[in-house]
Amino acid sequence: MSSVHPISDGIPSQQRPLNYRWFPSWRFMTSIMLCFCFGCVHLMNSNMGMAIVCMVNSSVTYDNETYPENAAPLLDWSSDEQGYIFSAFNAGLLVMLFTGGMADKFNAKYMILVSVAIASLANLTLPYMAPISVYWAIFSRFLVGFADALLQPAMNSLITRWFPTSERSYALGLATGGRQIGTLIIIPAAGALCSQTEIFGGWPSIFYLSGFIGIIFIFSYIFLGADKPSKQTCITDNELKFITIANQSEDVGKKRTERKVPWKNILTSGAVWASVISLVCHEFPLMTLIMFLPSYLHDVHHYHSTENGILSALPTVSLWFAKIGSSYLNTWLQQNTTWKKDTICKVLNSIGSIGLGVFLLAATFLDKSHAWMAVLFLCLSMASAGLHTPGCQLALVSVAPAYSGAVTGFTFFFVAVSGIIHPILTKMIVKDRTAAEWNLVFYISTVIAIFPIIIFNVWGSTEVQWWAKSKASMQQDPNNKKMSKASKGSTSTPSIDSIDMA
């Protein structure tokens, strides 16, 4: 049962430097649990990219493989139907436009638990339903997307309450790094499970394994998770005070259920739109690599199931290391250099966009005789994409911390729209599964990848926008032109009593 920690005497003054160790701490434990959570949901998403290679009759025939009688049935899905299955996930993400506001008002812990439960149920039922009709498979994928629509804004909202500004880049890298860990686990596992028929007949075992891992997380997070520090029964008073004082300048004075989301300010904010466009341009090429890399390696470089699963995981490993390393680098540069947070964010984001596009383009010049080099270029492309985490993704939780759930939902709505278009467009292009068709997909992704170099550098920001600041912090800002008349006459500093600790 959750409890509220009392905040009493002995709180350090605002002028006193505050610090509390990262390890061991409940901030570290929270980031690890969020990493586990993202890993669960993302492996339940990315498993389809590998599983479909051995689920669909045309793919198996291409390998000249014959399946024994105890094998799971092969499915006669057309290329268009496969595109709809991949798009269904992103159709579920469209709901994030509404779930984003919920994350700032309701308990993020419960939203996370519901999210993983829905994704687990969808994966556990898919093997039964998919042979009946392709529409069951599409609906199952929609549910996984809906689960992610609950998870992403809830996680961003939770991060703004658990972590001081200086730690959010690293916490975000650790948490979202779970996506790569989930992919890293499921793709080679799926490749191995595809090539056998003893366990549940082959491909169904991929979805059963995914759902079982989700159930393990649910029971773990029930006992270890908390919506915010004051509801964590095991946290020390010193760490609670550290987090509370560090975040006192942000707009957390009202109860979340009483706070109104400033949609007009969000919709007219250049910083928000820069993050929206940059994140869409970042995610589009990643969809190519995450959803279709096994198919690309299968069609162009003729890798079979087991080695395909291993090689498809290598770019994901590169992305994970780059994401963790660049997120830590962002934090280190803020603490040990005179660079502004904005400058660090934009430099890392620009390097990421250039590398993502250039190495993706380079892979198109290679045929199957240089397959190992193509895998290397794809690894470098994915590694470059990792630099977007301390870049445009950090901006999502920085421009308006008190409304990070709403901003995240608004942003990922457009990511979902592009995600619906992407697989349908890809399957429309890749009809005969030739190298020329796959190269065209890579050309489109390359052009989109380089847009954030201009967009984010000109209009992007990681500074808290004036409309997202607390009244107390606005009083202290002499340059704030939006300060109310009542605030102008006050010189008091933020107190612990004004902070929502419930």
Image (cartoon, helix red, strand yellow):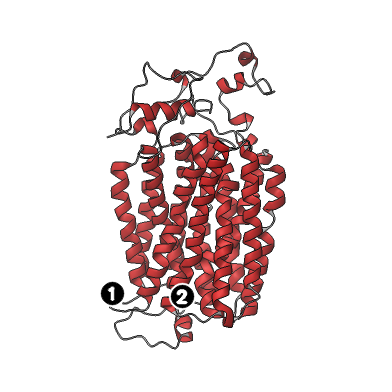
> Dot 2, crowdedness within 10 Å: few (<14), some or many (≥20)?
many
The residue positioned farthest toward the front in the image shown: 336
Q: Residue at x 46, y 59 (%)?
A: 142
Q: Amino acid at mark 1?
A: Ile
Q: Residue at x 31, y 42 (%)?
A: 224
Q: Nearer the viewer, residue 167 or 70?
A: 167
Q: Position of residue 106 (x, y in %)?
A: 43, 37
Q: Position of residue 7 (x, y in %)?
A: 37, 21
Asked whether the viewer can see residue 475, the reply is yes
Where does label 1 land, which residue? 199
Residue 363: image quadrant is bottom right
308 in relation to 67, above or below: above
User: How many numbered dots are placed on residues in this image?
Assistant: 2
171 in relation to 422, above or below: above
Q: CA distance from mark 2 to mark 1?
A: 20 Å
Q: Residue at x 33, y 34 (%)?
A: 232
Q: Earlier in the sequence, mark 2 or mark 1?
A: 1
Residue 472: image quadrant is top right
Residue 334 shown left or right of residue 143 in the figure? right
> Dot 1, crowdedness within 10 Å: few (<14), some or many (≥20)?
some
Element on which disc 2 rests: helix
The tag on residue 308 is: 2
Asked whether the viewer can see residue 134, the reply is no
Q: Nearer the viewer, residue 434 or 486?
A: 434
Q: Position of residue 105 (x, y in %)?
A: 46, 35
Q: Amino acid at mark 2?
A: Asn
Name the image quarter holding the C terminus: top left
314 in relation to 229, above or below: below
Element on which disc 1 rests: loop
Residue 319 shown left or right of residue 477 in the figure? left
The residue positioned farthest toward the top in the image shown: 489
